[in-house]
Image: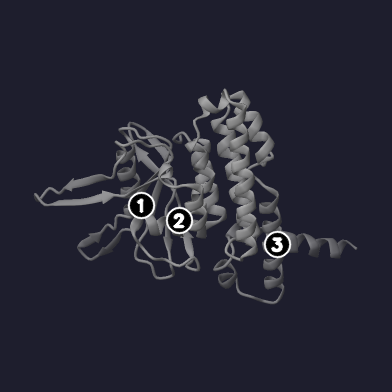
Amino acid sequence: MSNSSTPYDDAFRTLLTDCSRLIIPLVNVMFDSNYSMDDAVSLFQNESFITAGNQQKKITDSNFSIGKNSKYRYHIECQSSADGTIIVRVFEYATQIAISTAVSERDTTIFDLPRSGILYLRSNSNTKEHTIVVNAPNGKSLSYTVPIVKVKDYSLDQMLNERLWFLIPFYFFNFDLNDMDMSEDKIEEMKETYKLLWSRLDEIVDGGKLTEFEKCAIKAMCDQVAEALSLTHSNVKKGVMEIMGGQVLDYEAKRVARERDIEAVKNMVYFGVSEEKILSKYSKDIYDKALDQLKQAEEELKEM
């Protein structure tokens, strides 16, 4: 049994998977770090089996590192609203990550807890950083704070100018949908906001800071989040469909990029590049797909 997943969790995980480097500015803000957008982001398994009466599979929103020689794992949870269980889940996931990376040296085992943080899509004045205290059997204690980022604290201009592009799909949480649903003027204002956003994103792409693929991914996730939030607001939903364009999760740009990667891997295999070197750049799924296509082409030639 897996834990429930919202469209917002899916948007978070999809954007992290497809456009990993976009998480870097958010990490820099959340953990006061200074990674470059050129640093490689490595994604790790985010499924764990937790025993709670029965064995239950739970999925964390992220488990990654930044940079080739990073000594830190990062773990950020995407939370649509504050509740009393989020910090327990954060620690639960953090310990599972620590277990998966544990190192034993003779009679000592080292558990490295990841740098955990929470991205709050909704928040209020009571939504604050939380301190975790772990009491050891020998009477000693470990204490650390889980930092937070609130989407409501950032204007669209800040997201664009400070490269917090990862937050853009969640900007829709800042609208009062009940109010908007009763006002055609406010729906038009929302539509104008997104028209301007698409234009600004095009400018950023033209400036070479964002790729066309990343822009399409951001727009697709904007659509997914806005559509989910407006389900019970018929007038807002109509406006969303008009401005967002009804893009789907498996957007066209993603398909094109995947096909391009498969062709690149096929060429590398043809010219004798080692499997290890190919897998250092491309996923195992892309590599296997390329091999299947090469094998199929070879079989077709034999039949001719």
Report if residue 291 is visible in the image: no
Mark 2 / mark 1, whichever is N-terminal: 2
**Which of labels 2 and 3 is toward the front?**
3
Residue pictured at 67% horizontal, 72% vertical:
268
Residue pictured at 34% horizontal, 33% vertical:
83
Q: Residues within 10 Å of mark 3 (few under 14, many from 20)?
A: few
- Say which element carries label 2: loop
Give the distance between the C-alpha atoms of the residues marked 1 and 3, in whole angstroms.
33 Å
- Say which element carries label 1: helix
Q: Which residue is mark 1?
A: 97
Give the amino acid at mark 1.
Answer: Ile
Q: Is residue 28 left or right of residue 242?
A: left
Residue sitting nearer the eye, 273 or 43: 43
Residue 148 vertical placement versus 191 (above, below): below
Q: Residues within 10 Å of mark 2 (few under 14, many from 20)?
A: few
Position of the C terminus, as image quadrant, is bottom right
Q: Which residue is mark 2?
A: 44
Q: Which residue is mark 3?
A: 260
Mark 1 / mark 3, whichever is N-terminal: 1
Residue sitting nearer the eye, 19 or 161: 161
Position of the N terminus, as image quadrant, is top left
Which percent across, then down, holds residue 85? 32, 34
**Which of labels 1 and 3 is toward the front?**
3
Number of numbered discs overlaid on the protein picture:
3
- Pointer 2 with pointer 1, Cβ within 8 A: yes
Give the distance between the C-alpha atoms of the residues marked 2 and 1, in whole angstroms.
9 Å
Report if residue 64 is visible in the image: yes
